[in-house]
Image: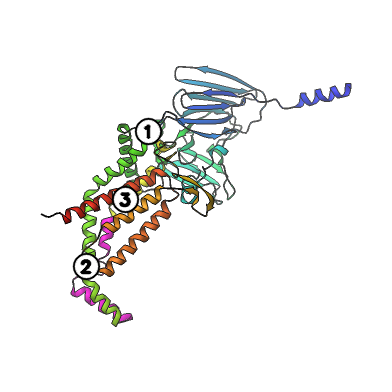
Amino acid sequence: MKWGFLILYLVLAWSPPVLAETRIVTETLDLSFASDGTLNSAIACFPSRGSPVASCGSFGSRDVIGHEIGNGAWIQTSTNSETHIELYFEQASGASLSWKIPLNGYLLELKTQAVGPLSIHSGAAFRPREAAGFGAWLEQTRYLGIANGKVTQSGLDEEESTRLEAEQWLGYRNRFWTLLVSSGRLMEAQIKSGEAMLDAEMKVASTGQGIDTDTPESWSVYLGPVEPGTLRSASPELDSILYAGLWFWLRWICFALYYLLSWIAAVIPSWGLAVMVLSLTVNVLMRPLSRIADHFQQQVQATEARLAPELQRIKKEFKGGKQAEKILALYKTERVHPLYSLKSILGVAGVIPIFIGAFDMLAENIHLLNASFLWIADLSQADALASLPFNLPFFGRDLNLLPFLMTGFSTLASGLHQTPALDAGLRKKQARNMLLLAVGFFALFYTFPAGMVLYWTTSNLISVFKSLWGRRNKHTPA
């Protein structure tokens, strides 16, 4: 019996101590620190306008930001001020970490000494939300590096990516949340990636930093929402991660549409209605370009109608090179450029950048996260009117109503818009092309978030009203 007590004593004596956690809760952050200064878990919350409940994102529940020093014996002290809480962790070996946490905000200050590179992880809670089709592409987690305002991105599944360099910020992000660190000088990150990677894992060090250095290292840590104003208030270059895959002028369009939507939402206490009003506003603002596009389209259709009979005769009577020669001769006689049909594309070219801008802006708009509208529980996800008893490849198991409404309005608008200059054959061809376009948009948008589909559905509904108004004016006696 005596030996049993001795063995139990030895086991308890040699068991590693349970690390006590220190939890800090501010207006925007919920953080837990281990006794060695590791940021064990982190939750950031963003108070969205018009919603009584803030949207929150978890960055992980273990080793969100850690180091390579063993547990050992650490001494912890803390101080509070009117604006910050500061935690200080020190080990007898000389290693130390100091965290300065704002009471309101997302930018933390970290000072380290003799702890080596930072180990950064995301956890299961940061993994992409479940989505089908193209919607899953929007939810991906990516590594980021910012250097001179330019953003380098790398997916977790890119097996060839093992290293990132940046002069300003390094970290990872998903659609709405990001964790980025900066040391104020050139940094290098060893990243883990591959087909099976579900979480971000990276080891970040400033150039020349080593585990035995006696020089303190200062870090800035942004841990919060991907939102223009919040990012910019933390650091001017941080908003470069927004719409990073677009050309600079397309990014300007995204920002313009973002602030336009924000102004509308300040008046209308519903993000769903605000998106619909944004679509209407953009249609009104784009009316001059739309008129030019319509004019070019009418010119092309009139030319097609004029050339159609002779083109059909040539194609019936001639083949090969002779046919091409006759067609070019017809164009010359009618003073029509062989590429005349591209004129209609020139008209649409002015509208496409706005479409791309609205698409990207609504995809990354955190205000739509958890925002409900009508039957839609979350505008940042597909509308999911009902669940199907089976799973459709690519389309998932949710029945989304908005894509059907969008396609229906598009088809109706196309049917109402008839061009008198076209003969029956060309009208049939035009109707077929418009139907194929509507089906293509349906497949593209079916799995996209409801906010994006709502914008385009509203635009198609406006086209229906415009077509009805045009037909009414056409049949109204002068």
Q: Pointer 1: what residue?
A: 229
Is residue 259 visible to us here?
A: yes
Would you say 446 lies left or right of 418 here? right
**Residue sitting farthest toward the left:** 478
Tell me if mark 1 has few (under 14), some (14-19) or many (20+) residues whose alpha carbon lies within 10 angstroms of its own. Answer: few
Is residue 148 visible to us here?
A: no
Q: Is residue 339 magenta?
A: yes
* In this view, 119 is above or below 20: below
Would you say 30 lies left or right of 363 here? right
The segment highlighted magenta reads: 319-348
* In this view, 167 is above or below 113: below
Q: Nearer the viewer, residue 90 or 347?
A: 347
Q: Amino acid at mark 2?
A: Thr
In this rendering, the label closer to the viewer, 3 or 2: 3
Within the image, what quadrant is residue 216 found in?
top right
Q: How is the image coloured?
A: rainbow
Residue 92 placed where, x, y %? 65, 22
Q: CA distance from mark 1 to mark 3?
A: 31 Å
Residue 132 placed where, x, y %? 50, 49
Give the SS element for disc 3.
helix
Q: Residue at x 27, y 76 (%)?
A: 312
Q: Amino acid at mark 3?
A: Asn
Q: Amino acid at mark 1?
A: Gly
Q: Pointer 2: what residue?
A: 303
Marks counted in the figure total 3
Q: Nearer the viewer, residue 281 or 395?
A: 395
